[in-house]
Image (cartoon, rainbow, N blue to C red):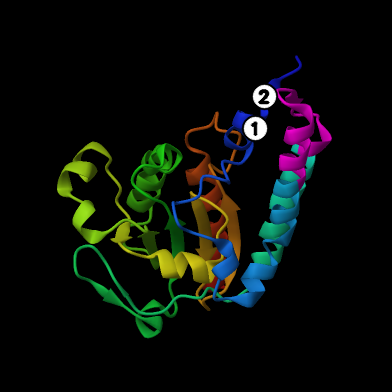
Amino acid sequence: MRLSLSFSSLVAAFTLVYLLYPGSSALYAQNNKLKLCTEPIQKARESASATKSLNQPSLVTIFDPTYQKMQQSHQAWATCVKGQKAPLSAFKTLNGESFDTTSLAGKILVVNFWFMSCALCRGEFPAFNKLVEEYKGKNVLFLGFTPDRLANLKPSFFEQNRFDFKIIPEAQSLANSFSIMGYPTTYIVDQRGVISQAWIGFASNGTDKLAPYHTAKAAIDNLLTAADK
């Protein structure tokens, strides 16, 4: 079966990467090493845009070179950020909890970047909530960073969109430090504060709603097992 996608839906169907929060830009990243890792994605995006302008309103298939280059760029990004220090500093959660590098040290961190109007981000919530429930009492901390303003993150939103991560509002500067390319983006950070795995989008082709759970669980279990040895 030959699957076809319009260029307008290509990114959402494949990696969900270019759903950028208004006003954000990876060009202003504070962490140069993580910024350098975005270059393959930048080039793939430019190539896709050029192809679109030449071939409108053509379709692209999952076997198309443009599609494959985008996939390869995300794999290159994930490989590049692995082993980099996560640029986390002091922050305060929606509920008033304070964290800094000292309190984060020695913990496995699941770091998710999201925002309220991002449907793809909200789609991950059930899978992530399952993860939080499974690792209760373990040395794992779940952090959800959003650029949304504190005043906009009302209880009514979470009543309709349950998200059990610790929510950190107004976190655009931190997103820039990570040099993220779009939302949602997730990092697994090890006990030394080093990125052990990362992915952009839904961690799958969008058909498996529990893909974020399975992907994160495998990474967390590996880190917990290594810590016990």
Task: Find the residue positioned furthest to the top.
Answer: 1
Disc 2 on helix, strand or loop?
strand
Label ID, residue 5: 2
Amino acid type, mark 2: Leu
Q: Name the disc covering residue 32, or none.
A: none
Give the amino acid type for the residue marked by disc 1 in the picture: Leu
Is 190 inside the magenta-drawn segment?
no
**Residue receiving disc 1:** 10
* Image-quadrant location for residue 11: top right
- Expressed as whole percent of the image width and height from the top left, the position of residue 127 reads 42, 41
Quarter of the image that includes the C terminus: bottom right
The reply, left or right, for residue 188 in relation to residue 66 is: left
Rendered residue at 69%/51% (across/down): 74
Q: Is residue 138 above or below residue 50?
A: below
State whether residue 144 is above or below residue 30: above
Q: Position of residue 51 (x, y in %)?
A: 78, 36
Helix, strand, or loop for circle 1?
Answer: helix
User: How far apart in space, not on screen, are marks 1 and 2 (Cα)?
Assistant: 6 Å
Q: Magenta span has 61?
A: yes
The residue shown at (43%, 73%) is: 107
- 71 displayed left or right of 158: right
- Around disc 2, counting alpha carbons within 10 Å, would you say few (fewer than 14), some (14 to 19), or many (20 or more)? some
Is any part of residue 82 visible from this angle?
no
Contact between marks 1 and 2 (CB within 8 A): the answer is yes
| Residue 88 coordinates in the image, percent (x, y) | 45, 75
Query: On screen, 186 above or below 193?
Result: above
Front residue (pair 48, 204)? 48
Q: Residues within 10 Å of mark 1 (few under 14, many from 20)?
A: many
User: Which segment did they paint magenta?
Assistant: 47-66
Q: Is residue 114 left or right of residue 155?
A: right
Q: Is residue 162 visible?
A: yes
